[in-house]
Amino acid sequence: MRRAIYPGSFDPPTLGHLDVIERAARLFDELVVAIGVNTDKAPFLPADDRLALLKECTSTLDNVKVTTFQGLLVDYARSVECGVLVRGLRAVSDFEYEFRVAMANRKLDPSIETVFLITRDEYSFLSSTVVREVARLGGDPSGFVPEPVARFIVGRRG
């Protein structure tokens, strides 16, 4: 079985994330969307909400599993017997950062490969940071995130 992990904070999940998930799900028998939980950071959305939202957004993708993890990604990958990491790239600046992370992961565990998927043009500007800023300033996030995420963010405003 070809299994891959798509790790990230997904804070919040964006249309760009969903695009990478859908495309990676076509390439692998099983895709684990792994939400990294950093207890030292104050997230925009709690991990449980991100988990529930991503499960809802991927409910039609039978080979996608959504979960959380803490600690080193390579340790998590070993624990679920996965040797492939999927990362999305929007721009050259993403490649530079992701390349360094991939090399560090390779140093920690040479058996784990990183596969990069180039984002679609319409999502090349999109990041969770942009969505958080739009939401904090009272803007409509619906053009940037899947419908369940937009509904959740707007509902939090009260």
Image (cartoon, rainbow, N blue to C red):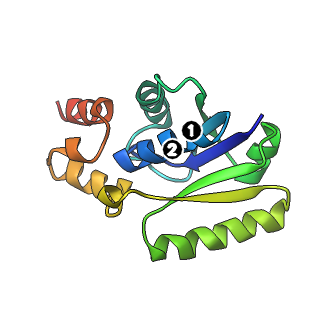
Q: Tell me the quarter of the image containing the C terminus.
A: top left
Point 65% across, 67% down: residue:
101
Q: Tell me the quarter of the image containing the N terminus.
A: top right
Depth check, front residue: 72 or 91: 91
For marks 1 and 2, give the CA distance: 5 Å
- Which quadrant of the structure image shows residue 82? top right
Amino acid type, residue under disc 1 in the picture: Arg
Residue located beneath label 2 in the image: 23
Residue 88 pos. (x, y %): 51, 57
Point 55% across, 53% down: residue:
40
SS at circle 2: helix
Residue 72 visible in image? no
Q: Farthest residue toward the front? A: 26
Residue 116 pos. (x, y %): 59, 60
Depth check, front residue: 70 or 25: 25
Residue 36 pos. (x, y %): 59, 46
Amino acid type, residue under disc 2 in the picture: Arg
Q: Say whether marks 1 and 2 touch (CB < 8 Å).
A: yes
How many residues crowd mark 1 within 10 Å: few (<14), some (14–19), many (20+)?
few
How many residues crowd mark 2 within 10 Å: few (<14), some (14–19), many (20+)?
few
Residue 37 visible in image? yes
Depth check, front residue: 63 or 110: 63
Residue located beneath label 1 in the image: 26
SS at circle 1: helix
Residue 11 pos. (x, y %): 42, 47
- Which quadrant of the structure image shows residue 122? bottom left
